Amino acid sequence: MSEGRLTIVGMGIKLITQSTIETRAAIQGSQKVYFLSPDLVSARWIAELNPSAESLNTFLKPGGVRLTAYAAMVDRILTSLQEGMDVCAVFYGHPGVLVYPAREALRRARGQGFEVKMLPAISAEDCLFADLAIDPGEGGCQSFEASDFLISRRPPDVTCHLVLWQIGVIGQPLHRGEDTSETFSREALHMLVDHLITHYGPTHQVTLYEAPLYVMCSPRISYLPLAKLTETSISQYVTLFIPRLRRRERDPEVLRKLRDL
Amino acid sequence: MPNDLIQFLLEVSSDAARLARYQVDPEGEMESAGLSDEERTALRSGDCSLIRAALHDCSADLLGFVAALLIDSGTNRT
């Protein structure tokens, strides 16, 4: 095992208040901290916890190629590890959910023989379950990244709930290396809605959900028919929730056998 | 001043007792912190975009795409 240790943590969604004690201890206890923060408040908080903290936001430049920025972030993290330091990398939300730099840093660090640990954190989906009073255990819940769902032409199971992450950046082209401004693709949204309508129908009520960043804010929740989704403005932090169309029939024979056990 | 607002939000978000006081008396806590009218209006609104504007913070505009899935159109690698 190489010297140096990497701990990857998340701040949760509601900034600072949703960070765990374990996460705070990891930040404070590391020799070097790197962070990608969505705002100035969390950036200051991390710097106060550990003065070694260095922002990775500087790699993100308007109009820049996102892939290049991601690679540079990971290189920066790995450099400190290779110098034998105990490093903590801090990301927004849950670091293991749709955070490419976190996942790539973990993969490369492990590949080079470093001890690596990722701590769980609250994700946007966790906030959605709480604010919409949804129990994913009751009938099930499928969860996909919106662009992946569209490109893979996934047929949803309409007997359980569906969560589509990052509907607000669906189809945006930066990850294919194009140096374009980061815009929401209305064409991709149309394609998605057309696909969903074939399974749910145009009047099925869906929910646009945005979790609050700050402790005094409330979630933004909009209910609308599926067909109206293409006419709505959608911010980048929004998650789409589609409730199940109907319940799945239970197998009476299986139930009978379980009761007879 | 944005700096006062940053510090206020940091303290309210990281100190449970401070948060509890804010939840009971938000006007009193904002007054004690010396926040400007614009900052108090933003906090009262409960609107994250207004609060970010009061912070003069552009960092959030970039971050939404950091978490996006990498799609390689050539190899279907993600």
Image (tube, rainbow, N blue to C red):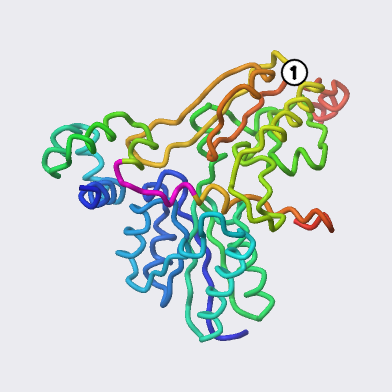
Is residue A191 toward the left or the right of residue A65 in the image? right
Residue placed at 51% from the left, 55% from the top?
A62
On-image quarter of the N terminus of chain A:
bottom right
Q: Quadrant of residue B75?
A: bottom right
Amino acid on which disc 1 is placed: Arg
Out of B9 and A137, give the one closest to the viewer: B9
Q: Residue A53, relative to residue A216: is it above or below? A: below
x and y, in percent, of residue A107 in the image:
67, 69
Q: Chain of mark 1?
A: A
Dividing the picture into quarters, in which one does residue B47 lie? top left
Q: Nearer the viewer, residue A10 or A189?
A: A189
Q: Position of residue B50 (x, y in %)?
A: 34, 35
Q: Which residues are magenta?
A: B54-61
Q: Residue at x 47, y 49 (%)?
A: A12
Residue A152, percent from left and from top: 82, 42
Q: Residue at x 54, y 45 (%)?
A: A123
Q: Secondary structure at mark 1?
A: loop
Location of mark 1 (residue):
A246
- Residue A4: percent from left, percent from top: 53, 82
Asked whether, in this view, residue A228 is left or right of residue A150, the answer is left
* Quadrant location, the C terminus of chain A: top right
Q: Residues within 10 Å of mark 1 (few under 14, many from 20)?
A: few
**Closest to the observer, B54 or A157:** B54
Whether residue A202 is situated above or below residue A93 in the rendered picture: above
Residue A138 falls in image quadrant: top right
The outermost residue toward the right is A253
Q: Is residue B58 magenta?
A: yes
